[in-house]
Image: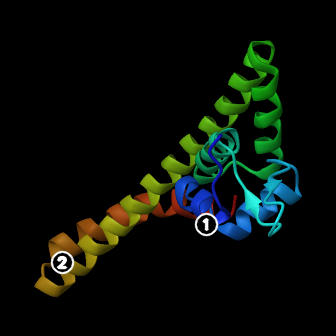
Amino acid sequence: MSMVTIQQAARRSGLSEPTLRYYEEVGLIGPISRDPSSGHRRYRERDLDDLQVLGCLRAMGVGIEDMRTYQANRARGHEAAGEQRDLLLRHAERVELEIAALHVHRDYLERKAALWDARERGDVAAESEAQARVAEITPRLEAMIHA
């Protein structure tokens, strides 16, 4: 069985060494085997598979408790399929809301840029139109800020 060091595990998983140690500490992975002579961690392929999954979940903004639930459901297999689906769909909904917010942010920035472009060109009509477009989106942006 192939075993890798913490540096190799970090490189392969995309997670930092402190994160790997933390995930072991809080029980998301492991316990991780230790080299008998040095005491250094040695990761098995199964550990690396777990780390890859956790790295993906972390990149998507999934929190520790939901990662813990995901890992527990993974271990339960098909029996936990519905729970796993629901957990992932909750996060998909959160991501959808984040995407919508980013669209509002982008629209606001583009409209403000158009306003300043019109000012730079001295185009009073375009400036007035751009100002109206900024005013249209400002309430949506403010609602998000205060939510």
Taking the spot 40% from the left edge, 64% from the top edge, the residue there is: 108
Q: Which mark is residue 21?
A: none
Residue 61 placed where, x, y %?
64, 52
Question: Above or below — where is 117 with respect to 94?
Answer: below
Which residue is labeled 2 in the image? 118
Question: Above or below — where is 61 with respect to 89?
Answer: below
Taking the spot 72% from the left edge, 70% from the top edge, the residue there is: 18
Which quadrant of the view contains residue 81?
A: top right
Which quadrant of the view contains residue 74?
A: top right
Q: CA distance from mark 2 to mark 1?
A: 53 Å
Residue 28 placed where, x, y %?
81, 48
**Within-10-Å neighbours for mark 2: few <14, some 14–19, many 20+:** some
Question: Above or below — where is 23 with respect to 52?
Answer: below
Q: From the viewer's perspective, is 82 left or right of 89?
A: right
Secondary structure at numbered mark 1 = helix
| Figure quadrant of the C terminus | bottom right
Q: From the viewer's perspective, is 12 left or right of 113?
A: right
Taking the spot 81% from the left edge, 52% from the top edge, the residue there is: 33
Circle 2 or circle 1, nearest the eye: 1
Q: Amino acid at mark 2?
A: Ala
Residue 96 placed where, x, y %?
54, 41
Count all numbered tags in the image, as a single digit: 2
Q: Amino acid at mark 1?
A: Gln
Which residue is labeled 1 in the image? 7
- N-terminal-most mark, 2 or 1: 1
